[in-house]
Amino acid sequence: MDKVRKISCVILDDQLFATKILSAYIEKMPQLELLLSTTDVGLALSTVENNEVDLVFLDIQMPKMNGLDFLKHCKNRARFIFTTAYSDYAIDGYENDVVDFLLKPIAFERFQRAIDKYKALVKSPHVATGQTSSTIVVKGDAKQKYHQLDVADIAFVKGLNNYIAIHRVSEAPIITYRNLKDMVNELPENDFCQVHRSYIVSLAHIRSIEKDSIQIGEETIPISASYKTHFFVKWQSRR
């Protein structure tokens, strides 16, 4: 039987205790292999550039070179998981090879979800993100600001030309410059459904259904003919 290749990991954080926590988490997961845990930016960059590194746990805020600059300098095929103590940190270029965003202190269960997300992303890049995580990260309307959203809090998504509005149950909508197709791929397939060229709805938040429309909160959302059959099949399968 062929030996299953482990996921090779590098940890870079300017705080030693943070590297020790992540190292301990990696040791608890047999499918992971720790190549390097360091506070030295140069050593980490050299290791990533000269070895087969799959996954880098990267602190965003470091004194000599922050995580964002590290990401820009790194030409390796590795993917990255950002770690930070700041929930509203401005992340420039987040979409490039970044799997997840872990807020310190990092619980082991949250760490495991990030690893699951990486494995699914490698296996199937187009659908992994939405199917393996209870959160998604989107860019807000403010320059270089990103939001981590609870998927269960999303009521519906509305397409608006070159951007979308993500309507949430508990807070105001978030406007982000991306297209609806990207959101279809990112949100969990079993929980969300596109019902119109301009709308994705959360099946859990539907209040009522008419022949050609859906009621979610105070919003009446149209169901177009091309999506109707798919929607009703999915809706009936949940009952």
Image (tube, rainbow, N blue to C red):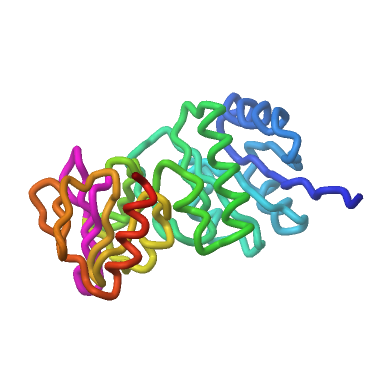
Residue sitting at x 50%, y 44%: 82
Query: Could you tell me residue 163's position as x and y percent?
Result: 25, 67
Instruction: Decide if residue 191 is on the left or right side of residue 70.
Output: left
Residue sitting at x 50%, y 55%: 69
Number of dots carrying numbers: 0
Q: Which residue lies furthest to the left in this view?
A: 218
- Is residue 142 in view? no
- In this rendering, the answer to whether 60 lies above or below 234 is above
Q: Locate residue 161: give its quadrant.
A: bottom left
Q: Locate residue 227: give its quadrant.
A: bottom left
User: Main structural element of the magenta stretch: helix, strand or loop?
Assistant: strand
Query: Could you tell me residue 55's position as x and y percent?
Result: 64, 49
Query: Could you tell me residue 138's position as x and y percent?
Result: 34, 54
Q: In which quarter of the image is the C terminus?
A: top left
- In this rendering, the answer to whether 161 lies above or below 212 is below
Instruction: Decide if residue 35 is on the left or right side of residue 107.
Output: right
Q: Magenta includes 101?
A: no
- Is residue 74 in view? yes
Residue sitting at x 51%, y 33%: 110
The part of the chain drawn in magenta is: 154-174
The answer to which of 23 and 62 lies nearer the viewer is 23
Q: Magenta includes 155?
A: yes
Query: Could you tell me residue 97's position as x and y percent?
Result: 54, 59
Instruction: Decide if residue 157 is on the left or right side of residue 36.
Output: left
Residue sitting at x 33%, y 58%: 193
Q: Residue furthest right?
A: 1
